[in-house]
Amino acid sequence: MDPKIVETKNNSLKGSMLVVGFPTHGLVGSVAVSYLRHSLDMSPVAYMVSEEFPPTVVMEGGVVSPPVRFYASRTVCGVNKKCNQLVAVLSDIQPSPGLLNPIGKSLLDYAEKKGIDLVVALEGQPVEETSGEDVRVVAMANKAAAPLLETYSFEKADGLVTGFAGALLLSSVDRSTPVLCLVSQAHRGHPDARAAARILEVINPMVPMLVFDTKPLRRKATEIETELRKNMAQQAESMKTLKEPQAGGEMYR
């Protein structure tokens, strides 16, 4: 199968929540999941590979890492097979449109195999300007996750869903694993760390044992955005001879 998820640790993830962040508008998912990874001191447990991925890797302390990585928090599941453990999928590449459906299927197959209770994808929706404080966050879910829309009083989305969120939801239509996509307004032209902080605040109540303190993210938003813009420019320069991946489409109205 391609893409393929390779486990590096056979951790018990029964009853956990899987949060997915791929680069889309404002890099909301990538910034949010990266912040979770560092603030919760999460450990690597798996990675995704594909022959169709662009020739890009991540260097961490001089050691190569795959561009799509899985991390788990150190909270251990209890004997009752329920826990408040968090699993995070962080991507530093934007897959081609033809890979989105296979990636969505692989992620949900992994979630079912590991007994994960809920999959949450974080996305950005482009707007010209955001305040970072009162940005709109909307939710969309498969049938298994639909009760969560009421439980957490999420604003429900209407309209056509495309891009990574659309692929993940398409793969979830006939599955029993609850799948939820949260989409935050984000700056159209550059990384939006404030929007990432806002979307983390929205999901915080869903993981009561893991409190996400977003104040540092908000304080460092300018620094984070500057660094991400620099990295994006470097990647664009190095990849200019290759076909540029298309950004996600409009996801709600």
Image (cartoon, grey):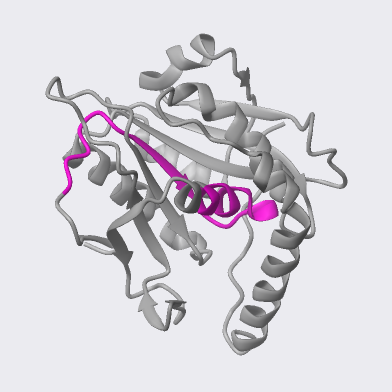
State the image quarter where residue 158 is shown: top right
Left or right, 123 with reference to 92: right
Q: Nearer the viewer, residue 86 or 119?
A: 86
> Split into 4 quadrants, where in the image is the C terminus?
top right
**Magenta-span inclusion, residue 13:** yes
Q: Nearer the viewer, residue 117 or 105?
A: 117
Q: Residue 21 location, x and y as percent? A: 50, 50
**Magenta-span inclusion, residue 179:** no
What residue do we see at 21% from left, 31% from top? Answer: 77
| Residue 198 to residue 240: above or below | above
| Residue 146 to residue 112: above or below | above
| Residue 105 to residue 146: above or below | below
Q: Nearer the viewer, residue 51 or 7?
A: 7
State the image quarter where residue 40 is shown: top left
Magenta range: 11-35
What residue do we see at 22% from left, 38% from top? Answer: 13
Q: Residue 212 location, x and y as percent? A: 53, 35
What residue do we see at 67% from left, 35% from top? Answer: 198
Q: Residue 132 location, x and y as percent? A: 79, 39
| Residue 228 to residue 112: above or below | below
Residue 133 shows in the view: yes
Residue 125 shows in the view: no
